[in-house]
Amino acid sequence: MERNFTQFPPPRERPYKVVLKGLPASTDIDDIKNDLANQGVTVSKVAQLTQRKSKSPLPMFLVEVRKNVPDSRDILDVSNCCYMSITWDSFRRRPGATQCYNCNYFHHCSQYCDLKTRCLKCAQERRTSDSPIKDKIENPECINCKTKGHMANSKQCPKYPKTNPKKGDPIPNNATPNKPNRKPNPKYPKPNNYK
């Protein structure tokens, strides 16, 4: 029997995500995880953040902590890690829709996906990271809308979800017309004795 579903964890089981700053980009992830564990923090995952285009590692690390663990120290109380002073920042995910790395559909992540695995580049039943195609594809075919000219993770795809701006999101420059912010001059009626 083929499994074909995805699931979503309840909010109380989702991890608390924070960004660790102050360590060099060359710091080993296991060293961070072990150091935080030695300080009494129950860490479930540590990942290094990368630049969006070049994918080069940044000196920032995403730390996921399980919620409601008894006798676990609050991660925001930790002020040093790997013998260095650190700061914490809230995690702000990338704008746009979430796309699964397993099936390449939208609105869920691969951690909870049991849908059929699809390669973004060749549509075979394997993960994109395991694809033998490493070079840029000249005229790709989208596995979501079946048209040529873009891949399934492109915003040009008609199946790519359009996201509504959330409260507090910046307004794009092209969303508001460039109109001067002044009121027109009021027109006063002419006095009766005006000639």
Image (cartoon, rainbow, N blue to C red):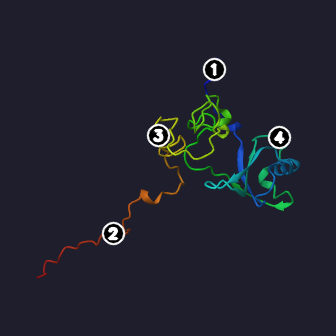
Q: CA distance from mark 2 to mark 4?
A: 60 Å
Secondary-structure class at tag 3: loop
Sequence order check, earlier mark of 1 and 4: 1
Secondary-structure class at tag 4: loop
Sequence order check, earlier mark of 3 and 1: 1
Q: CA distance from mark 1 to mark 4?
A: 39 Å
- From this view, report whether residue 57 is shown above or below residue 185: above
In this picture, residue 40 sits left or right of residue 132 = right
In this picture, residue 177 sits left or right of residue 63 = left
Which mark's residue is nearer the viewer, 3 or 2? 3
Q: Which mark is residue 2?
A: 1
Q: Residue at x 13, y 81 (%)?
A: 194
Count the marks: 4
The amino acid on which the numbered mark 4 sits, given as a three-letter code, is: Pro
Which image quadrant: the C terminus?
bottom left
Q: Quadrant of residue 153?
A: top right
Verify CB contact (< 8 Å) between mark 1 and mark 4: no
Which image quadrant: the N terminus?
top right
Which mark's residue is nearer the viewer, 1 or 4? 1
The amino acid on which the numbered mark 2 sits, given as a three-letter code, is: Lys
Verify CB contact (< 8 Å) between mark 2 and mark 1: no
Sequence order check, earlier mark of 2 and 1: 1
Which mark's residue is nearer the viewer, 4 or 3? 3
The amino acid on which the numbered mark 1 sits, given as a three-letter code, is: Glu
Q: Which residue is mark 3?
A: 148
Q: Which mark is residue 183?
A: 2
Sequence order check, earlier mark of 2 and 4: 4
Task: Judge the density around disc 4: few (<14), some (14-19), many (≥20) Cα neighbours within 10 Å.
Answer: few
Q: Which residue is mark 4?
A: 70
Task: Judge the density around disc 1: few (<14), some (14-19), many (≥20) Cα neighbours within 10 Å.
Answer: few
Sequence order check, earlier mark of 4 and 3: 4
